[in-house]
Image (cartoon, rainbow, N blue to C red):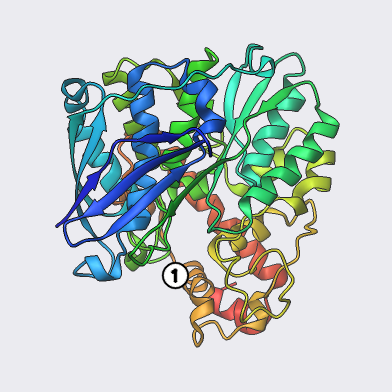
Amino acid sequence: MKTISVGKLSYDTSSGAGMINITDASGGNSTLNIDFETILPFINLINKEVLDFFIISATVYGIDRFVERKQNSVDGWTRELKVNFPVHNPAKWNTCKQEMNKLLSFLTGDYWNVEFRKETFDVPKAALDKEYSVPFAQISLLSGGLDSLIGALDFLKQAPKQSVLFVSHYDPQMHGPKGDQKDLITEIEKIYSKQFAYIPSLRVSLDRTNVSRETTFRSRSLLFLGIALTAAQATNTQSIIVPENGTVSLNFPLSPSRRSSCSTRTTHPFVLDNVLSIWKILSIPTDIRNPYEFQTKGEMVNACKDQTNLSQLVALSNSCGKRGHRAHWTIPGASHCGVCMPCIYRRASLLKIGDGTTYGNTINSLAPFLSKKSQDVGACLDYLNNPITKEEIKQELIVNGVKNLSKLNQYVDVVWRTRLELKQWVKKEGNSTIKSKAGV
């Protein structure tokens, strides 16, 4: 088990950075650096439990990157983490300790054992800008991806007399998301200039480290929820929206080996439900909702209420999970690799409206079972070629963490329709070899 010590947050007034020291018993040491100045005016207006949740969400992101999986697990993936978090009221946090352990373990694929100790933090004063004083109907993620773009356009088109507050975060060691967010905000502002406000993308990164950083980012959705909750309480907004298609939220494993280590769970229903249960225990009344949980990515695209602007902006969004690995791209200057699962879902979803995105590879330019870079393609083709019943999907979803049985049949149908979308895409884009591998 890896025992992690989390230091008290300190604020540097000269740089505006909030810094948290993260150490382990073997001498590992890193500093989590948060652009605290950006969020500070909101921090001034929230209660201690919400501040604690924000700090914990950022620290979990830092720990996720601090403890490298291969060196700290028996199976090359699953880590055992014992962490002591500083909070204002440990007794209150101890009432949701079990829920926190379950949430973090499910989210990152590890075993977490959390503890809480009492620390206080005096927040420097900072005034909230007037643009954030208007009533917001919701707080919404604008990550730079296609789903969050659709979520933004749907709200702005359907609610011309209401306002939304967009939030996001970025890590400077992950190139791309901040630029995507900025490009989309610039264009959306030209169309819906008076209907939204935007908190500048919050920088959170692991700096000054003497250990190798972990390259996976399974906990980043919790950081978004921490930022969103802070913004929600500071602006008296009751609803947080996470726009994510049901396909990605459920992340139905393409094979049994992908049930945990290869399946992200950032907006899985279990995660959102557990966060809500923790907030309820802490007397935090804010709600979280994913209005697209029963839609495939293609259905999100086709049902978007602003098709004209979606078509114009879609190429500015980015869905790629491997955009930093360009060595083997056929088109090195493309914006997407084209063959990771996020890219595959994206390409299949855009069949009907057209896709101006540039992709580094196509399924036909790879030898799917011979090169490491095509592992997702190979797994996807195998998955499509293997017959599966709705009952088998149901059982797999239960194994994969779906607890709300009242929604189970709707989730099964999302998986079923996703398979059809993928097959339609392979049938249109694949050559004879690829089609044969997919059984279409």
Q: Where is residue 373 in the image (x, y as percent from the top left)?
A: 53, 78
**On the image, numbered disc 1 is attached to which residue?**
386
Q: In this view, does 307 lie to the left or right of 201?
A: right
SS for tag 1? loop
Q: Is residue 340 above or below residue 408?
A: below
Q: Can I make out residue 239 in this image? A: no
Q: In this view, does 40 lie above or below 417?
A: above
Q: Residue at x 67, y 60 (%)?
A: 347
Total of numbered circles in the picture?
A: 1
Q: Position of residue 123 (x, y in %)?
A: 41, 22
Viewer-proximal residue, 422 or 347?
Answer: 347
Image quadrant assignment for residue 283: top left
Q: Give amino acid for label 1.
A: Asn
Q: Can I make out residue 86 in this image? A: yes
Quadrant (top left/top right/bottom left/bottom right) for the N terminus: bottom left
Crowd rating for badge 1 (residues with CA inside 10 Å; few <14, some 14–19, many 20+): few
Quadrant (top left/top right/bottom left/bottom right) for the C terminus: bottom right
Q: Where is residue 104 in the image (x, y as percent from the top left)?
A: 29, 44
Q: Which residue is drawn at 62% across and 55% down?
A: 319
Q: Where is residue 98 in the image (x, y as percent from the top left)?
A: 18, 34
Q: In this view, does 260 lie above or below 287?
A: below
**Residue found farthest to the front:** 14
Viewer-proximal residue, 423 or 102?
Answer: 102
Q: Which residue is drawn at 51% across and 37% down?
A: 293
Viewer-proximal residue, 140 or 439?
Answer: 140
Q: In this view, does 431 lie to the left or right of 56?
A: right
Image quadrant assignment for residue 190: top right
Q: Residue at x 73, y 77 (%)?
A: 331
